[in-house]
Image (tube, helix red, strand yellow):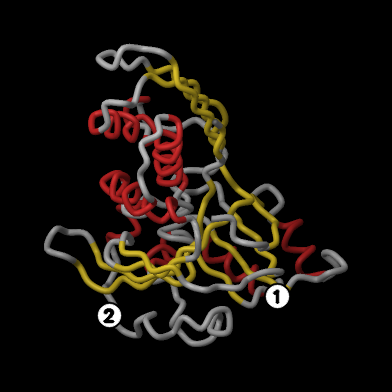
Amino acid sequence: MILYPNCKINLGLRVIRKRPDNYHDLETVFVPIYGLHDELEVTSIPSPAVSRQISFVQEGIAVDCPEEDNLIIRCYHRMAARYPQIGGVSIRFRKNIPFGAGLGGGSSDAAHMAIALNELFSLGLTKKQLAEEVRPLGADCPFFIYNTPCFAEGIGDKLTPIDLDLRGIRILLVKPEEGVSTKEAYAGIKPYPTPSLKGKLNIPEQLGKGDAFVNDFEATVFPLHPAIAQIKKRLLDAGAFYAAMSGSGSTVFGLFQNDPEGCTDARLRAFKEEFASMILLDDTFGEWQA
């Protein structure tokens, strides 16, 4: 079977508090973006359960980790250890979502691998059960099981689906060459418990108004990476009604009221020309596909 693990963006990201386990509680709104996705083909191959043969071929963007540390492989081994009916698999994987970009690509890959195993080997797991299976692999892995707009709490793993209508809104998603490590982003973060996103989920009316939908990581990342801050400024200058860094960066996105006659706005054309080498996605929100 072939799946297309998609990326996500964050509408607002508030870091609420540091936990005793050194993780941070946060609040954010996860939104799936289907236009930018990896490709994951998984087929079962006959093999004894004790050997569970794996064939793994990766194409596209090189992943900077050993094969055994790839979240797809880790997901397979975790689930194979728990469900004896899982046999050998052949995996072909094309990486299109850049890593270290705040887009959740690796987490999406792991979640979609769990979905594939559930289907291929008739495990009969519900979405809630699948979310529990992938939770140890990454805080935002459960989101990609549901793959619909969600308000997230805790470390990003406590999810509440929300009604969100962005149909017709245009998104420009930009990934600069420089990256931001999660460690770097958290190093200077200052927990800011108020104002909370709770009770302020009147989206998209609230976007770009007030400070509810601010990404707290911007205060840490922008001084260290002025080029990333400049992308956000240029998106707003080009007419975006909301622009923000996604997750801990370095991807920045802008939301625009879509022009049915095409890209006729001179400011938007100028932006696309200026950042042509960085544009990853120019798309329009449609129906959610979850």
Q: Which residue is mark 2?
A: 193
Q: Nearer the viewer, residue 59 or 5?
A: 5
The answer to whether 21 appears left or right of 148 in the picture is left
Q: Label 1 is placed on what type of residue?
A: Gly
Instruction: Quickly name the residue at label 1.
Output: 239
Q: Amino acid at mark 2?
A: Pro
Is residue 213 something that shows in the picture? Answer: yes
Above or below: residue 278 compared with residue 216? above
The residue shown at (59%, 55%) is 289
Q: Residue at x 66, y 53 (%)?
A: 281
* Element assignment for label 2: loop
Of residues 124 and 246, which is closer to you in this image?
124
For this view, does 100 lie left or right of residue 233?
left
Residue 219 visible, this angle = no
Label 1 residue SS: loop
First reached walking from the N terminus: tag 1 or tag 2: 2
Q: Which mark is residue 7?
A: none
> Where residue 7 appears, x then y in whole percent?
52, 51
